[in-house]
Image: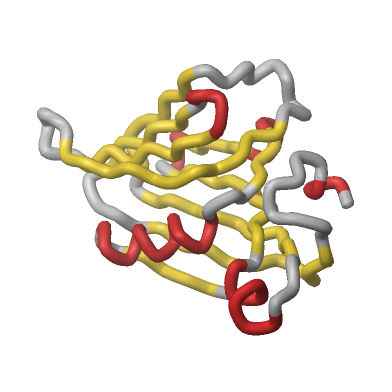
Amino acid sequence: MKLNAIDTEELKIIATVLQDGLIEVNDVRYLPSIRTFIVMITRFMWEEKIVNKTNNRTKAVLVFEDVLAVHSKNIDQMDKAKVLELLTFNFYYNKSKNIEIELLFNNDATIKLETEVVQAKLEDQGDSWTVEEVNKKNDAQT
């Protein structure tokens, strides 16, 4: 799968595709010199569940460009192997008229990106694999 988002409506589609995605803290990077936020996510393939009735996951890269700042809450950045489960995205305009995009995870963890425009890309990487169930916490390693 390959998706691009240049507005909040398209960002909602990416958020839906990534629901129940698993992210290791080690796989999150902000590169301020090029204003880019990158995350490797193990996403549940909802399209396979709907079409073929199978539970599959695949690795995907999510990239946000033109990011001015990144803040996290309730994430121990020293615990590199910690796995976060993505619930959804929130987005809104702040006082500076910039867009804030919040990635909301289980356990009240968040990553907030500040950007002037929505510019996101999602692209699957490699082959998928079968998992037992959607919310199995350790299926990222299977």
The percent coordinates of residue 142 (x first, y second) are: 88, 52
Q: How is the image coloured?
A: secondary structure
The percent coordinates of residue 94 (x first, y second) are: 16, 32
Indicate left or right for 28 with 63 as reference.
right
In the image, what residue occupies the spot 47% across and 71% down?
Answer: 3
User: Would you identify the image quadrant in which residue 119 lies?
Assistant: bottom left
Q: Residue furthest right?
A: 142
In the image, what residue occupies the spot 32% across and 66% down?
Answer: 10
Label tally: 0
Q: Of 62 and 86, which appears nearest the observer?
A: 86
Q: Of 13 and 132, which appears nearest the observer?
A: 132
The percent coordinates of residue 66 (x first, y second) are: 34, 47
Indicate left or right for 29 with 24 as reference.
left
Q: Residue furthest bottom?
A: 51
Residue 17 lies, with reference to residue 91, above or below; the image says below
User: Would you identify the image quadrant in which residue 86 lies?
Assistant: top right
The percent coordinates of residue 109 (x first, y second) are: 51, 26
User: Would you identify the image quadrant in which residue 75 lies?
Assistant: top right
In which quadrant of the rendered image does the N terminus lie? Answer: bottom right
In the image, what residue occupies the spot 40% across and 51% down?
Answer: 65
In the image, what residue occupies the spot 76% across and 45% down?
Answer: 136
Indicate left or right for 133 with 18 as reference.
right
Residue 94 lies, with reference to residue 5, above or below; the image says above
